[in-house]
Image (cartoon, grey):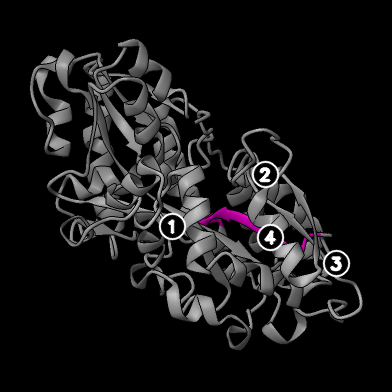
Amino acid sequence: MPELPSRRAALRGLGAAGLLAALAGCGVPAAYVPEDRRRAPDLSDRDRALAFSNWPLYIDTDDEDEESRPTLEAFTRKTGIQVRYTEEINDNDEFFGKVSPALMNHQATGHDLVVVSDWMAARFVHLGWAQKMDRSAQSNVARHLDPQLRSPAFDEGRLHTVPWQSGITGIAYNRRALGREIKSVKDLWHPDLAGKVTLFSGLDESFSLLMQGNGTDVTRWTASDFHRMCDQVEDMVRRKHIRRFTGNDYTSDLGKGDVLACQAYSGDAIQLRADNPDIEFVVPEEGGELWAESLLVPNLARHKANAEALVDHYYDPAVAAELAAAVNYVCPVPAAREVLAASPDRETARLAENPLIFPDDAMRRRLAVARDISSAERPALAKRWNAIVGL
């Protein structure tokens, strides 16, 4: 399996937040688009096509032909809809900067369907830049979407977004080199890990797990919870306990033994453990963050119905199972577990028992979907965090 570049580990600056703040400060009310002004004439019936933009290496491919994407090709055979699939999203803020001028000025972006992290999807939803999907045409989504992901605070009822894949933020560590278990976020601060710990540099990637370590309910955290966490991290930086803040290169640090423990994503942990069985991934006793990266239809998309049909295709448990087997993130379609379990291929069938792809009830009780950072909060919180990280 190729190593997947993390969708959530790119560095975050004040770029998108600064843009929104500037709009508000300049008194530009036109940034928000009401629901009744988001649609364009839908060409889906006469133009059997759609433009779908995703992150690199985030879909199944044929082992013998990396340009072949079996689940997309199956959709085209079934519906006759041709999909122009591009791997153009490498960073949430970068993509936001690319499409925001058009959306701000009530113009089409050329995208019918995109995948962004949920904290970025929250911006699209709050700005009125994502269209409400027609769930009456999405029976698979209605039936099979993971209940724990059905109603995030930023999009109650998942009216405008649908998870593409999900994942868990927890702790990865080298059990053999450390010589003990890690069970808690507080274990990261043990003296024997001085200089051997990394944290994520991105604000949205870091804050939830670290606040959970303080017993904070991250579904309704406050600014005081955030600053208490920052005080702790700042102290650890001062003591040189934290080796550095990372993007997705944490996997290299852990693999080489430069660090012994770090914040990590469940999808990466599966690959790390395949390469080195001494690597463990743990959801701390205080809990871990369950996150998602979601599909949305931007305003004025010209093939909305075709995009909705593709979304529903990926919520067919058989299709979801094929995708989960390829990318190894948390599958947002729990019914796909039974499909994988019935596979005649032993290695594929074992994926059904992996709690990092299909969390069991015990793990789910320790997972929470953090409330997003509002546009009003973001400038001040990002300024504090970036000063600690050194951005």
Query: How far apart in space, not on screen, are marks 1 and 4 (Cα)?
Result: 38 Å
Nearer the camera: disc 1 or disc 2: 2
* Mark 3 neighbour class, 10 Å CA radius: few under 14, some 14 to 19, many 20 or more: some
Q: What residue does disc 4 label?
A: 74
Q: Is residue 353 magenta?
A: no
Horizontal and vertical percent for residue 370? 34, 59
Element type at mark 1: loop
Q: Are marks 3 and 1 in contact (CB under 8 Å)?
A: no
Question: Which numbered circle lies on residue 250?
Answer: none
Of residue 391 and residue 314, the one placed in the foreground of this image is 314
Nearer the camera: disc 1 or disc 4: 4
Query: How far apart in space, not on screen, are marks 3 and 4 (Cα)?
Result: 32 Å
Nearer the camera: disc 2 or disc 4: 4
Nearer the camera: disc 3 or disc 4: 4
Q: What residue does disc 2 label?
A: 89
Labels 3 and 4: the sequence-earlier one? 4
Q: Is residue 213 left or right of residue 313?
A: left
Q: Are marks 3 and 4 in contact (CB under 8 Å)?
A: no
